[in-house]
Image (tube, coloured by chain):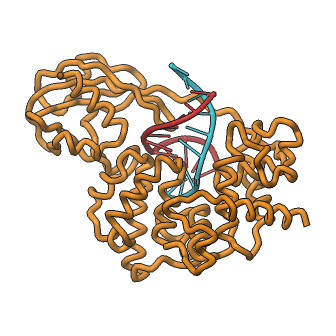
Chain colours: A orange, B red, C cyan
Amino acid sequence: MTADTLRAQLLAWYDAGARDLPWRVRPAAQASGLRADPYRVWLSEVMLQQTTVPHATPYFLKFTARWPSVTDLANEDDGEVMAAWAGLGYYARARNLLACARAVAREHGGVFPDTEEGLRILPGLGPYTAAAVAAIAFDRPGNVVDGNVERVMARLFAVEQPLPDAKPELKRLAAALVRDQRPGDWAQALMDLGATLCRPKAPICDRCPVAGHCAALATGAPETFPRRTAKAERPHRYGVAYVLTRGEEVALVRRPPKGLLGGMLALPTSDWRSARWSDAEALDAAPADASWRGVGEVEHGFTHFTLTLQLLRAEGEADDVIWTARRGLDALPSVFLKAARAGLGALL
DNA sequence: GAGACGTGGCC
DNA sequence: TGGCCAAGTCT
């Protein structure tokens, strides 16, 4: 059958050239009985949600060196894990990571459930991650569908319906290719194809092992798949960030546990709104009575809005802040690291 | 179920 | 340079 031919071609390509990634056990090694560690598979999958391999890899190495097992992670303090995650983004992932590790440690004796259904209940494991961990770590057949797989399906079958409406159809097409044989390798082969050859822009079709099956290639413009509906434009917001120093230390605050940058350390800020802040308004919202002076601004793009942070700097005292040495600033999310650097640099 | 939720790289 | 994009989940 065509589907089985396609599978055989893609798996052969994967066997010959699977990427060597720190959390992966390559097919040849699996043949000698080596299996992937569920903890490492889970950790990598969570870090890779909406995140590129180059960005996630150093974090994965840092986490596994510091917390070699899920129990080690479960026993760590929240602040330490949030600080280690700083810069990776989507911080709800870090909060759920800890909640999941503690659930596995407390309710499952430190052993991950070995089925998709069992995994799906854990915090931070949605349909994709539960299926991926079940397939990769436990060799459970399942339909592992992420953005790569959606793109590959949209191209193989030249799906005209635009994303995100096409998601159910793409998932159905992917399901029709799943078999009981080598489910983990199949999932990773599909994702490797999407990441290396069947890329969003400039796909490398002349090296694709399944180009002969690709309806999008046959149209002459494979890169135009998947179709997408136009996105709404991002609004702009303004806020004031306060860089308060006491000698070599900087005043930080802990953000509320939910919402944007929830649970992370931050510079004190005003509210964020659609209008720029006047000097008087900015002084009014300051966390301390001090000789504030403007030291410029920084701009930062979030997923759903663009933020301009007007920077005010002063030397002084304040209550309810966390005084932090400059070295500790690497626990800040990128937006505040950028603001802190700009504000402190202005003082030199 | 539509919107919230980060970041850095690329062209 | 600014919009697009990357191994999604939660509410």
Comparing A125 with B4, the one in front is: A125
Comparing A325 with A22, the one in front is: A22
At x 13%, y 38%, the residue is A249
Write down the quadrant of residue A16 in the picture.
bottom right
At x 23%, y 25%, the residue is A345
Residue A14 vs A330, above or below: the answer is below
At x 74%, y 76%, the residue is A180
Q: Quadrant of the C terminus of chain A?
A: top left
Whether residue A321 can be seen here: no
Image position of B2 (left or right of A253):
right
Q: How many marks?
A: 0
Image position of A129 (left or right of A250):
right
Q: Position of residue A235 (x, y in %)?
A: 50, 28
Whether residue A325 can be seen here: yes
Write down the quadrant of residue A62 in the picture.
bottom left
Q: Position of residue A160 (x, y in %)?
A: 82, 42
Q: Position of residue A236 (x, y in %)?
A: 46, 26
Image position of A148 (left or right of A120):
right
Q: Position of residue A115 (x, y in %)?
A: 59, 77
Comparing A331 with A106, the one in front is: A331
